């Protein structure tokens, strides 16, 4: 994990050069595109500060990054080739530097978010099994834990796939392996032949991480035909830095694709999910009907903001690998400090030691205290079992200290015993 830190001047030069390489709606005779720069009555382009604002300048220029630009052997829309190159550099940085992929061995694109990226993976693997294994849709199942993001259920519903949902241990949040074995056997008895396995590199509510080695060992031992997707929408920009010796990356031959979200840990604008996959798979979702798009389209959403790709690239480049590692380690240390205080109060909680999410058992926290500090519950329909704290960069130590003081006062009043 080693990429260079760029200065603000270097970033400005690269982005503005990319915009110069793009065709300009102002100075180029563009007649055929169904788009333009942002409305000039609302977003004027002659503000002096734009000279020092590469992201805002890209946003106003409004490049469209439709398609998948890591497919280097395909034709692409050359009107926006400058900023497309920045997106390609971003995908290579994420797949090769953060997730240990081989040089130019992965494809990917900046999606609207983790939901789209997860559904993109399910879509690819469904089509892969149909084309390569002559499978029917009823032959394919998506396997994921009950703590997984709701995009798995959404994707299975959209793609008409069977869902196999795995129970987790209430305290450890680990998939119950005995149930995993029985659920897989039951699915096979019902005729399922091919499995899309989705494992979590940090669940949204708990920050739990699925046991990739135990699960893949079972799949291999029983000669099960599967493809493995890692949902690292939350953990992808922190876990590889706080626990670098992990198996949730492209060095693991079982991992075929990964989702990460820029608009979570990376603090980029919403709409900056990232989908990464080994080369050779994007063709399974090529939309041949997109004949008016140079190179055709391989993505779920089609048209995409080039400015969003530039934003994520800028953030990673301004920090560099060492700067980002330090930032994530600092958040992790702050999370550990809060956990120590909770333990001192004998408060029950779940936390993965490499992540910045703490799920506190609800009977320790009043609804009034949860509301005061905007804690997130595990359910807004049924009884609440956990309240979640996420230690993000905006969270100040003073706020955490105030929370602990308020929590201790409540516990004293309730006289809750140690558990």
Image (tube, rainbow, N blue to C red):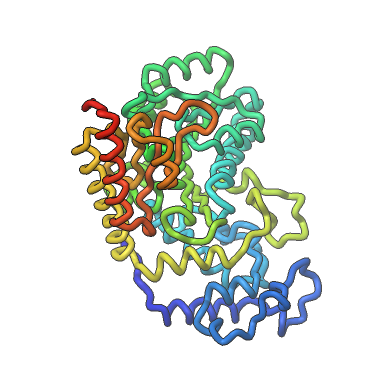
Q: In which quarter of the image is residue 293?
A: bottom right
Q: Residue at x 48, y 82 (%)?
A: 13
Seen in the picture, residue 148 relative to 311 is either above or below; the reply is: above
Indicate left or right for 404 with 102 as reference.
left
Seen in the picture, residue 202 relative to 392 is either above or below; the reply is: above
Q: Which of 155 and 338 is in front in this view?
A: 338
Looking at this view, name the residue that lies furthest to the front: 413
Looking at this view, name the residue that lies furthest to the left: 344
Seen in the picture, residue 302 relative to 89 is either above or below; the reply is: above
The picture places residue 180, in percent across and down from the top left corner, at 42, 21
The quadrant of the image that shows the C terminus is top left
The picture places residue 96, in percent across and down from the top left corner, at 40, 56
Indicate left or right for 21 with 374 as reference.
right
Q: Which residue is drawn at 26% across and 28% down?
A: 416
The picture places residue 198, in percent across and down from the top left corner, at 47, 35
Q: Which of 398 and 318 is in front in this view?
A: 398
Indicate left or right for 306 with 31 as reference.
left
Q: Residue at x 45, y 60 (%)?
A: 267
* Residue 254 appears in the rendering: no
Q: Quadrant of residue 326?
A: bottom left
The quadrant of the image that shows the N terminus is bottom left
The picture places residue 372, in percent across and down from the top left corner, at 42, 46
Q: Which residue is drawn at 52% across and 68% down?
A: 310
Q: Which of 103 and 150 is in front in this view?
A: 150
Seen in the picture, residue 149 relative to 220 is either above or below; the reply is: below
Q: Which of 328 and 246 is in front in this view?
A: 328
């Amino acid at each position: 994990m080693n990429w260079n830190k760029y200065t603000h001047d270097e970033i400005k030069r690269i982005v503005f050069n990319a915009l110069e390489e793009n065709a300009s709606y102002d100075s180029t005779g563009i007649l055929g595109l169904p788009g333009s720069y942002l409305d000039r009555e609302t977003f004027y382009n002659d503000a002096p500060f734009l000279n020092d604002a590469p992201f805002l300048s890209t946003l106003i220029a409004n490049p469209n990054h439709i398609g998948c630009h890591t497919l280097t052997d395909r034709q692409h829309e050359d009107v926006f080739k400058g900023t497309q190159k920045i997106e390609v550099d971003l995908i290579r940085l994420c797949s090769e530097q953060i997730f240990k992929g081989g040089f130019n061995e992965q494809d990917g694109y900046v999606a609207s978010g983790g939901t789209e990226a997860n559904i993109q993976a399910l879509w690819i693997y469904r089509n892969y099994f149909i084309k390569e294994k002559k499978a029917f849709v009823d032959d394919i199942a998506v396997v994921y834990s009950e703590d997984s993001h709701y995009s798995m259920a959404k994707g299975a519903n959209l793609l008409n796939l069977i869902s196999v949902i795995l129970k987790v241990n209430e305290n450890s949040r680990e998939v119950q392996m005995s149930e995993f074995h029985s659920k897989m056997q039951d699915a096979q008895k019902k005729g399922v032949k091919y499995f899309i396995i989705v494992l979590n590199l940090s669940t949204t509510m708990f920050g739990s991480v699925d046991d990739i080695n135990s699960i893949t060992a079972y799949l291999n031992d029983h000669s099960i035909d599967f493809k493995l997707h890692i949902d690292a929408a939350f953990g992808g920009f922190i876990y590889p830095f706080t626990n670098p010796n992990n198996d949730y990356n492209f060095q693991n031959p079982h991992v075929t694709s990964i989702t990460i979200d820029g608009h979570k840990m990376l603090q980029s604008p919403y709409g900056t999910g990232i989908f990464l996959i080994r080369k050779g798979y994007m063709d399974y979702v090529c939309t041949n009907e997109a004949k008016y798009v140079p190179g055709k389209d391989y993505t779920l959403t089609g048209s995409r903001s080039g400015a969003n790709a530039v934003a994520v690239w800028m953030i990673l480049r301004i920090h560099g690998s060492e700067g980002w590692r330090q930032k994530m380690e600092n958040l992790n240390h702050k999370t550990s400090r809060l956990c120590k205080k909770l333990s001192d109060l004998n408060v029950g909680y779940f936390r993965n030691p490499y992540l910045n999410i703490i799920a506190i058992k609800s009977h320790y926290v009043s609804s009034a205290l949860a509301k005061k500090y905007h804690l997130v519950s595990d359910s807004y329909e049924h009884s609440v079992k956990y309240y979640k704290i996420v230690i993000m960069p905006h969270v100040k130590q003073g706020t955490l200290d105030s929370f602990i003081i308020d929590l201790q006062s409540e516990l004293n009043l309730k006289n809750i015993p140690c558990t």
